[in-house]
Image (cartoon, rainbow, N blue to C red):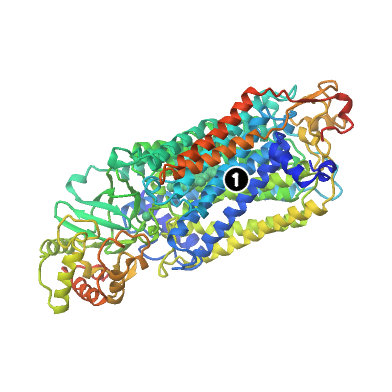
Amino acid sequence: MSTTIEQNKGFGATLWDYLTTVDHKKIAVLYLIGGGFFFILGGLEAMAIRIQLIKPANDFVSAGFYNEILTMHGTTMIFLAAMPLIFALMNAVIPLQIGARDVAFPFLNSLGFWLFLFGGILLNASWFLGGAPDAGWTAYAPLSTTSPGHGVDFYVLGLQISGAGTLIAGINFLVTIINMRAPGMTYMRMPLFTWTTFVVSALILFAFPALTVGLFLLMFDRLFGSGFFDASMGGNSVIWEHLFWIFGHPEVYILILPAFGIFSEVLPTFSKKRLFGYTAMVFATVLIGFLGFMVWAHHMFTVGLGPAANSIFAIATMAIAVPTGIKIFNWLFTMWGGSIRINTAMLWALGFIPSFTIGGMTGVMVAAAPADYQYHDSYFIVAHFHYVIVGGVVFGIFAGLHYWWPKMFGKILDETLGKITFWTFFTGFHLTFFIQHFLGLMGMPRRYWTYGADQGLELGNVISTVGAFLMAIGAIVFLYNVIITTIKGDKVSGDPWDGRTLEWSIPNPTPHYNFTQIPLVRGLDPLWIEKTEGRKGMTPAEPIGDIHMPNPSILPFVMSLGLFIAGFGAIYQIDNPIWLVVLIIGMGITFGAMFIRSVKDDHGHHIHKEDLDKGAGL
Amino acid sequence: MKGWMGKIRTLFLLSLLSLLLSGCGKENLTAFSPKGYGAEVSLNLIIISLLVMIFVFIVVMVIYTIVLIRYRQKKGQEDFVPKQTEGNKALEVIWTVIPIILLIIIAVPTVSATFDLADTTEKNDSLNISVTGNQYWWHFNYGEEEIQTSQDLYIPTGEKVYLNMMSSDVLHSFWVPTLAGKMDTNPENENTMYIEAYEEGVYYGKCAELCGPSHSLMDFKVIAVSPEEFDQWVEDMQNVNPDATPETASAQEGQALFENSCLSCHAIGSSPTAVGPNLTNFGDRSKIAGVVDYSKENLVKWILNPEEFKPGNKMSGNYSVPEPEEAEKIADYLLQLQPSEVTPESATE
Ligand code: HEM
Ligand SMILES: [Cu+2]
Ligand SMILES: [Cu+2]
């Protein structure tokens, strides 16, 4: 992407290019930068938490501020770091993997990104405007409805805006994968990363509306005096818990399934072997997605739903372990009999297997409701979900970044630095979180600002904090690696790993239109098939012809900016009705941009076939 | 089941856990050495599921290790292309069926324990106590006995005690790890759980649901005493005369001051006022406000500025702060509120 043509452009022109781009490859870069920024922010918040807990009765941060930090850490990491980083990889890879020139709705793709970014900025603006939300990332009512100040209002509106972006992105990928696969790529020939993206997009479609509804009700309770969650007005706070987790549990699968997809690409490539049990892998993915909607109340075993509900949700939750187990064994047997090359991408995949297995084990353990009466809301749970989210999702993102970096940026990330990152991060991760299983059962509840000196919790907490510093070092080395590679790294070929899937058939740098000719897919691992039959690249499915591409547009940016402004109006109108003007102006900007979009014909442009090999449109 | 479970448990705790940690946490706080029925049921289930899961982990790690040793690319084999296996039906059936069996091993005791711990058939013949979670303290109301207390929950050992829980504000969760798992207190509905302590002792309780800045400072205690001592305690508490005149002059003045500026929230005796903790047996407590070390000095400090100890508490700003000398006198009054011989100390003897 960073072609010479671009490097010669001025800063202003590049900026404008990115503000208006509808190219999935550039949107991937935007997601990467945005998600990366919030990942650093969430990481700093995590370090503040661990420093506060390094010794008993510490006062590194005050109690109220601690609650803001822990709320923002969770919210940021889930919504503003993990999700966008995954979208970065999906955007970078999916169209290439299915042999398409772009996504189905390039305009919406850009809109999804800007909504996420402005939602995230709105949420974080709370830091400077009287305090961040402090009711936990789960925002349980009545704590969230009664929390003073505007923190939780920022939470509600920030997530509402960025959530809309996620929903749009999900729908876009769903349509893209259904409609835009290259000829010959049947569903059962789709690479696993495409499959998991497909399933995850469906999960987004069904899960995010529950969050949207919940946030709306919360917004009405806080800003317009309703009482949906207020027991004294006939409301019910448990309903928020249901709405949140009906969204929240599928959300954890929305995060982990793409990571599963990434490992299912990395492991075959570096074992030089076809994915073992492809069909089973696909069905396991679908089954996990399906069951993921039936288990939300396992976050609510202690709410008092009664033994029948608790038993049903316990068993449904355990059932998910079966397809998950199938996946683990299929990955192991993908490597069995292979020819394993261990580089950084592969290291992350190899580190994932034991780490995630531990997270899955504790997952089954917390599913046993009467045992969860002890684990619940203790550090054991903190350990469990970090094993799955860090050991699964974050390891997956690292694996994916190392694997696809040459596709995204034309260069391979430095291997030595990569290995240093892996080993410090991996060690730090286990140091930080393994001990927390014990801390939990030793009586340390989660979300505790401090603990007493006489409670036997010191040693575990010190170890945990030391581990966190190692993780931070690993992350810093990774950043350094990105910078040094960008400056010094050598350009590589379009297929540096001896890849198996379509994206590796494209030359480096990837042309603006991805494929000069759409390829013909003749089976699973299409590029590998061509290679084993002695061909260098894909057989084209069409003659060289004019290529139709969408035009860039600033409107997605403007629409999101409008909602961002309207968000402030909605939050502050409760203090002073004059802010309603801001709300109206903001909505006006958004609707105005939507109106322009509707009436202005934009048919895109064509790249003429005579220009194709001259590198036009790069 | 109890017999062999017990054996496995001892063996297990001895070998694995004590190896990993020097001890398993603080006595009467940790969930690792249960002294109550609920905690024991939970720990048994924890151990069953952990053993099954360790088995799975070992299988995974054995295959993993073999793969990494045997199938690394060797020097000179860069061009070797392995056989592209599609899958193996038999293997796939095995790793679907065996996990299902393993999960059934966990699921059966899970369901039976879930119903066991929710059993309310004996509720009407047992001691019932209403528990209210408040930002940031606990209130206990012995309805039939007409006793109100806060922070310290007295129960008799060896019998099921039913706790009927609600919240007066936001969500909290009642957790005494050594005696039983937790249960949330909700503002709209009453939740019931029972606890049964096997031994006398003082057990540490914590709030396990984020409830505001002082969430981590909402500690309480369960004081389990023999049934005889418990009856004694009930009698003592019932006989408290809230208007009794203290012995020292300072405490007498303190009483007057207290009645003026504190009684609107804090009750003494069985009055149902519970805007703040009931202080009937404050002199028998071992912590102030659940977390502050018990001393007159700290008590005076608390009376003058509770915010220093518990950020965001609901006392700060809602009473007229006395002069320091007055606070001393109020402290003298409160410290002598010792209605019973049955105290945390007697429970640990
Ligand atoms: C074998 C699979 C899994 C099982 C059986 C499982 C089970 C559970 C259960 C029962 C809880 C609730 C515990 C409690 O709060 O008392 C829980 C919490 C959680 N799990 Fe999982 N889980 C599994 C996998 C995952 C995955 C893949 C993710 C994310 C990628 C995940 C993320 C979380 C999170 C974030 C929480 C805590 C949420 C919170 O309270 O803030 N889990 N899990
Ligand atoms: Cu869940
Ligand atoms: Cu709390």
Residue at (85% x, 43% y) in the render: A4
- The C terminus of chain A is located in which quarter? top right
- The N terminus of chain A is located in which quarter? top right
Vertical side of A415 occupied by A501: above or below: above
Count the labels in the image: 1
List x then y, in percent, for residue A305. Answer: 34, 39
Q: How many other residues sit within 10 Å of disc 1, few (<14), some (14-19) or many (≥20)?
A: many
Answer whether residue B284 is visible to the viewer in this image. Answer: yes
Residue at (71% x, 36% y) in the render: A21
Q: Chain of mark 1?
A: A
The secondary element bearing badge 1 is classed as helix
Question: Would residue A188 be found to the left or right of residue A455 on screen?
Answer: right
Vertical side of A549 occupied by A309: above or below: below
Viewer-proximal residue, A583 or A532? A583
List x then y, in percent, for residue B144. Answer: 14, 51
* Residue placed under numbered mark 1 in the picture: A82
Mark 1 beta carbon near ligand 1 (under 8 Å) = no
Answer whether residue A270 is visible to the viewer in this image. Answer: no
List x then y, in percent, for residue B297. Answer: 30, 76
List x then y, in percent, for residue B302. Answer: 30, 69
Vertical side of A216 occupied by B246: above or below: below
Residue at (19% x, 56% y) in the render: B273
Viewer-proximal residue, B157 or B277? B277
Question: Would residue A5 be found to the left or right of residue B121 on screen?
Answer: right
Choose top left, top right, bottom left or bottom right for residue A26: top right
Amino acid under disc 1: Ala
Question: Would residue A601 be found to the left or right of residue A610 on screen?
Answer: left
Viewer-proximal residue, B240 or A380? B240
